Amino acid sequence: MPTLNINGKETAVNADDSTPILWALRDTLGMTGTKFGCGQALCGACTVHLNGAPVRSCVTPISAAVGQKITTIEAIAADDKVGKAVHAAWVKHDVAQCGYCQSGQIMSATALLKGKKKPTDADIDAAMAGNVCRCGTYVRIRAAIHDAAKSLA
């Protein structure tokens, strides 16, 4: 039974090593904030952080996460000032429409702002390119990321 560090807590996961992180989180641990979208790492709904980097949990096996730090949407607002700033900007700009993709969007945006304090539109587009929003809130997403960056300056 592998043990994973999820949101700062060592957690035993009763699942095969080849199980994608997504299903360990959702089905085994009941952490449903990370969403299933396409199952092929194309839409970004399942994005979590692995040692601070955004990864698609639908195709990343738990064996790749042993000894690493997994951060999920459940912890991102409490993560630090960047997570809090992104969360606040998302609310301020009313980014979510249906909301399904938003946990993945927030995870990618947070990773971007941890690496780039003043992202350009091109930086944002590149970092968010793998996250699909079927409702088309991309303009609000970009505005929220710029706003979060300003609040962190």
Image (cartoon, rainbow, N blue to C red):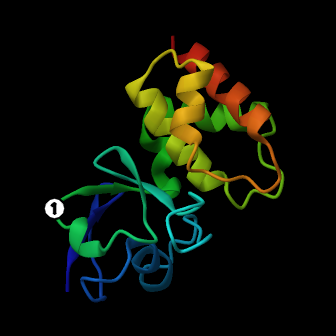
Residue 101 lies in quadrant: bottom right
Neighbor class of circle 1 (other Cα within 10 Å; few <14, some 14-19, many 20+) is few
Of residues 8 and 65, the one drawn nearer to the viewer in this rendering: 65
* Quarter that holds the N terminus: bottom left
Question: Residue 51: horizontal and vertical position, in percent?
Answer: 28, 48
Residue 116 against residue 110 in the figure, above or below: above
Is there any visible trace of residue 105 in the rendered image?
Answer: yes
Task: Say whether residue 21 is left or right of residue 110.
Answer: left
Looking at the image, which residue is at 53% across and 63% down?
46
Looking at the image, which residue is at 51% across and 10% down?
153
Task: Say whether residue 39 is left or right of residue 121.
Answer: left
Number of numbered markers? 1
Residue 35 against residue 8 in the figure, above or below: below
Question: Residue 3: horizontal and vertical position, in percent?
Answer: 21, 74
Question: Residue 9: horizontal and vertical position, in percent?
Answer: 29, 61
Looking at the image, which residue is at 60% across and 50% down?
131
Is there any visible trace of residue 77 in the rendered image?
Answer: no
Of residues 55 and 86, the one drawn nearer to the viewer in this rendering: 55
Looking at the image, which residue is at 21% across and 57% down?
68
- Name, please, the residue furthest toward the top: 153
**Which residue has dot 1 on it?**
67
- Name, please, the residue furthest toward the left: 67
SS assignment at label 1: loop
Task: Say whether residue 17 is left or right of residue 122.
Answer: left
Three-letter amino acid code of the residue under disc 1: Gly
Question: Residue 21: horizontal and vertical position, in percent?
Answer: 38, 72
Residue 58 against residue 147 in the figure, above or below: below
Residue 70 lies in quadrant: bottom left
